[in-house]
Image (cartoon, helix red, strand yellow):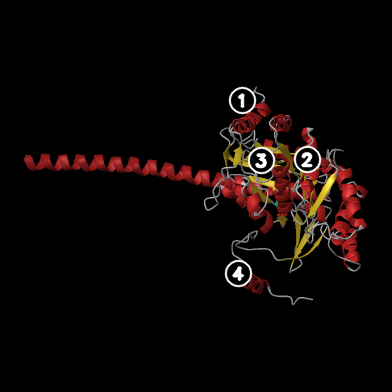
Amino acid sequence: ATEQLSKSETIKLRNKHIGQACQLFYRTDPLKIVRGQGQYMFDEEGTRYLDCINNVAHVGHCHPEVVMAGAMQMATISTNCRFLHDELVQCAKTLTGKMPPSLSVCFFVNSGSEANDLALRLARNFTKRQDVITLDHAYHGHLQSVMEVSPYKFNMPGGEKKMDYVHVAPCPDIYNGQITDKMHPDADLAKLYAQPVEDICTNQLAKGQGVAAFIAESLQSCGGQILPPPGYFKAVYEAVRSNGGVCIADEVQVGFGRVGSHYWAFETQDVVPDIVTVAKPMGNGHPVGAVVTTPEIAQALQATGVPYFNTYGGNPVSCAIANAVMRVIDQEGLQQNAKKLGDYLLDECQQLKKEFECIGDVRGVGFFVGIELVQDRDARIPDTKSARWVVNRMKQVHKVLVSSDGPNDNVIKLKPPMCFNRENADEFLMTFRECLTTLMQDKLVAAVDAAKAKANDRISSAAADTLANKTKLLERHDRLIKSV
Ligand code: PMP
């Protein structure tokens, strides 16, 4: 086994040998996680953390059936998919069995980024076009090709510029986006948000270029846990397809039953994409992903005569693990659990919203929840500072891991492992309530201090005025006496 290092030694080595651009949670006091089980993670001292953010450990950290499936296959054979293997075809059968019938062909990859890269390639090859529409604040991966369709990254101050063939449509965030339910209480927001997508399609077509693909997460996670208005994807898909493009649904974060009501998040909008990308939860921590598409789109790639080969994509170990994950989701009723407890969590968070002014919005579906913190509820002014404070306090004081996200980093994000239970939900709710109470008390104390300071200023300025008046009177008196 690897030698156990002290935490400070681990930090020192990481600082020296790992690129400092690599993201690290809680950078000023990072966590050293040495073990995981179910919905819990343990640090080097054995402290237990409740994991409310790990959508990768989908069926629970180190689920024994998944671990065993991987270990057994590792001990049997792991090779590439140019050889026949039952785990590969069974994985493809199960995965496509969970999809609408038109999505019947798989390509296996190793990550979400690879899946989206291949999805773009398939779309561009099928349509013989290059342009892609993406949503504002979207993130689709770290490869060059997918960074180009990730405004979340390229719009950062030091980010690379937007490419001409990339078109950014507004994120359908009806709470804090370009078009809100407050601005247009009676409007069809789905239609209003779909219009810019249609405009891009028709404009590009008029230029003789056309759009190859529209890519979007079925529920935008990086945008701040966004639920598009009902009918949005129907309208967008219709616009894209009628203009000759294809529709890619990125289910990398939100797939595999997380939304509770359905296995895939795109089903909540009653649409059928042309290409679906999956990864993260599929391997429960092991790198595996896939692109699922129609026979026509897959056939168009074959027609190029350039074979697709990926050394690790679809290897028997990855497929055995993915098969075990999908089995466990069904065996343990985890989708149903996400529905039942997700509803409970959302209801309770709505209750918290009634009590705490600092909560501007609570939204979600299943185990995909966002709680938006605001400085002013009416004006919907984001409260980034408080969100960060809550994330840190939850970890430091309560040993509960949550994260914040969104364009203003003010949305508390929950996407726990699917085995999250009622006790876990209550632990989150109780500790989150404590944080909000403390936050409100601190804000109140600060407000009282500010009011006192203002009052003191007023008192002292009144006193100064009186003094000045008295001085003036004395001077006048002096002058009078001298003149007598
Ligand atoms: N798409 C989405 C929606 C993601 O959240 C991520 C990862 N955060 C990716 C794609 C990229 O996946 P990976 O990190 O596995 O390459």
Residue 264 visible somewhere in the drawing: yes
The quarter holding residue 28 reads: bottom right
Q: Are marks 2 and 4 in contact (CB under 8 Å)?
A: no
Q: Quadrant of the C terminus?
A: top left
Mark 2 to mark 1: distance in Å? Answer: 26 Å
**Discs 2/1, front:** 2
Where residue 247 sits: x, y (%)?
A: 73, 38
Mark 4 to mark 3: distance in Å? Answer: 43 Å
Please name the amino acid that badge 4 sits on. Answer: Asn
Q: Are marks 3 and 2 in contact (CB under 8 Å)?
A: no
Q: Which residue is mark 2?
A: 265
Where residue 198 sits: x, y (%)?
A: 64, 30
Residue sitting nearer the eye, 420 or 212: 212
Counting residues from the N terminus, which is met first, the one under dot 4 or under dot 3?
A: 4
Q: Which residue is mark 3?
A: 129
Q: Are marks 4 and 3 in contact (CB under 8 Å)?
A: no
Q: Which residue is mark 1?
A: 184
Q: Are marks 3 and 1 in contact (CB under 8 Å)?
A: no
Counting residues from the N terminus, which is met first, the one under dot 2 or under dot 4?
A: 4
Write the residue at 66% across / 59% down: 396
Residue sitting nearer the eye, 405 or 380: 405
Mark 1 to mark 4: distance in Å? Answer: 50 Å
Where residue 96 sits: x, y (%)?
A: 86, 45
**Discs 2/4, front:** 2
Answer left or right for 301 relative to 11.
right
Counting residues from the N terminus, which is met first, the one under dot 2 or under dot 1?
A: 1
SS at mark 1 in the image = loop
The quarter holding residue 298 reads: top right
Answer left or right for 32 relative to 466.
right
Please name the amino acid that badge 1 sits on. Answer: His
Q: Are marks 2 and 1 in contact (CB under 8 Å)?
A: no
